[in-house]
Image (cartoon, rainbow, N blue to C red):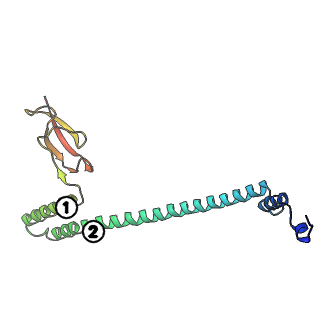
Amino acid sequence: MPHTEDAAEAPAPDDRADDQSRADEPDRQDEPDGQDRSADVAAQLEDELRRALADLDNLRKRYQRDLERERAAERARLAAAWLPVVDNLELALRHTNDDAASLVEGVRAVHEQAVATLTRLGFPRFESVGETFDPAVHEAVSTVNDEAPSGTVVAVVRPGYGTPEALLRPAGVVVATQ
């Protein structure tokens, strides 16, 4: 076989495989060692942690501001619901020099308005005379020997307001005993 310059310059097939494997290997001098990579990852994780904690703190502060704003708005709505009751009480007090019957009538009207306001706010009035005593909605203030079955509410000293699920105040009741 004749020997040509082209054949001499061409690498042998085994030499090409070695060149390819060396090209696939990263340059060891450009790559940081394992400790440097670990330090970079740790710094990145620490930065992400700080950012997450700052986001959490901001969320907590925003929630607190929103909660305070909602509480203030609810207090304002509640106060606004009671303003007509206060206005009518003042009107009734202005007429105290007039006859007593009109004053009593005015106070009754204000009382009805106040009870209606409590009902609108979700706390209806209840008295429970004749019902079985229920400690979840009744407060026994006295007992009395009565013809009614034992444990029956025979009188209401102080009416209750609310529902069994949302009780504002239990009814103060007198309970029958035998």
Up/down of 25 relative to 166, above or below: below
Q: Quadrant of the N terminus?
A: bottom right
Q: Amino acid at mark 2?
A: Ala
Front-lying residue, 43 or 81: 43
Label 1 neighbour load within 10 Å: few <14, some 14-19, many 20+: some
Up/down of 30 relative to 178, above or below: below
Residue 169 is situated, as x and y percent measured from the top left of the image, at 25, 49
Residue 8 falls left or right of residue 16: right
* Secondary structure beneath label 1: helix
Q: Quadrant of the C terminus?
A: top left
Q: Residue shown at 70%/59% (left/top)?
A: 43
Residue 37 is situated, as x and y percent measured from the top left of the image, at 75, 57
* Secondary structure beneath label 2: helix
Spot the residue most to the top: 178
Label 2 neighbour load within 10 Å: few <14, some 14-19, many 20+: few
The tag on residue 141 is: none
The residue singled out by tag 1 in the image is 114
Spot the residue most to the front: 1
The quadrant where residue 114 appears: bottom left
Q: Residue shown at 30%/67% (left/top)?
A: 77
Front-lying residue, 77 or 22: 22
- Label 2 with label 1: CB-CB less than 8 Å: no
Residue 177 is situated, as x and y percent measured from the top left of the image, at 15, 31
Which of pointers 2 and 1 lies earlier in the amino acid sequence?
2
Residue 85 falls left or right of residue 43: left
Q: Residue shown at 23%/57% (left/top)?
A: 122
Front-lying residue, 140 or 77: 77
The residue singled out by tag 2 in the image is 80
Q: Amino acid at mark 1?
A: Ala
The quadrant where residue 101 appears: bottom left
Q: Residue shown at 42%/62% (left/top)?
A: 67
Front-lying residue, 176 or 107: 176
